[in-house]
Amino acid sequence: MTMASQHDSFHSRLDRINRGKTSAWTIPGEGIAKPGQEHRIAALNVQRRAVARKSPLGRAPLIMLPLALILGVAAVLLGEWLTLTYLTADGPLGLDPVEMFGPEFGRYAAAALVAALACIGLHLGGARFWAHLAGFGFAVLYMPEIVQFAPDPFAEVFPRGWMSAMLSAPNAFGL
């Protein structure tokens, strides 16, 4: 490149900077885009961004909704197991959440903690959070029905006293 051509390219660059045209779109195989082509490319990019922002679930795949629902039920079951295994007056920790928080919340204190940690750890937000909360509420309200539906897996994990209390509880579905 000669000195004159470098001088010309430098001045043409300065002219573009002064006019505000510091960059240009390029089209593969065609070079620099014409002004009409630039507007079309910019409009397509704006439409793509707008569609991505309108999605109610964001980037989460739809499979996360049922998994969040199941995770809510699992949080209640894990909380119940932790309460019955470790959080009793006779347990190894000597803590009883029923005495600490009262019978209404004490029974589900560990379950609420497990559910909150699951929400934080798995970044459950938006629709996934509400699915998780629905699973949690379903498990809290219908725990006897869940146990009566399939008692064998629960009998292997939970104590007999808890199992008999769940099996003798009134069934909301009339089964």
Image (tube, rainbow, N blue to C red):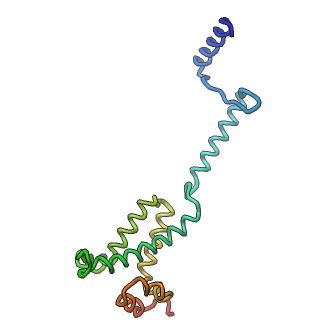
Is 68 situated above or below 8? below
Rendering coords of residue 93 (x, y %): 25, 74
User: In percent of the image, x 47 and y 84: which residue is there?
Assistant: 153
* Figure quadrant of the N terminus: top right
Q: How many marks?
A: 0
Q: Closer to the camera, 92 or 78?
A: 92
Classify residue 103 as left or right of residue 127: left
Rendering coords of residue 119 (x, y %): 43, 63
Q: Closer to the camera, 2 or 18?
A: 2
Is 12 situated above or below 40? above
User: In percent of the image, x 38 and y 65: which residue is there?
Assistant: 116
Residue 79 is drawn in which quadrant? bottom left
Rendering coords of residue 34 (x, y %): 72, 27
Is 85 situated above or below 173? above
User: In percent of the image, x 61 and y 15: which residue is there?
Assistant: 15
User: In percent of the image, x 49 and y 60: which residue is there?
Assistant: 126
Rendering coords of residue 45 (x, y %): 64, 41
Residue 42 is drawn in which quadrant? top right
As drawn, the residue found furthest toward the right would be 29
Classify residue 120 as left or right of residue 87: right
Q: Closer to the camera, 78 or 98?
A: 78
Is 30 situated above or below 152? above
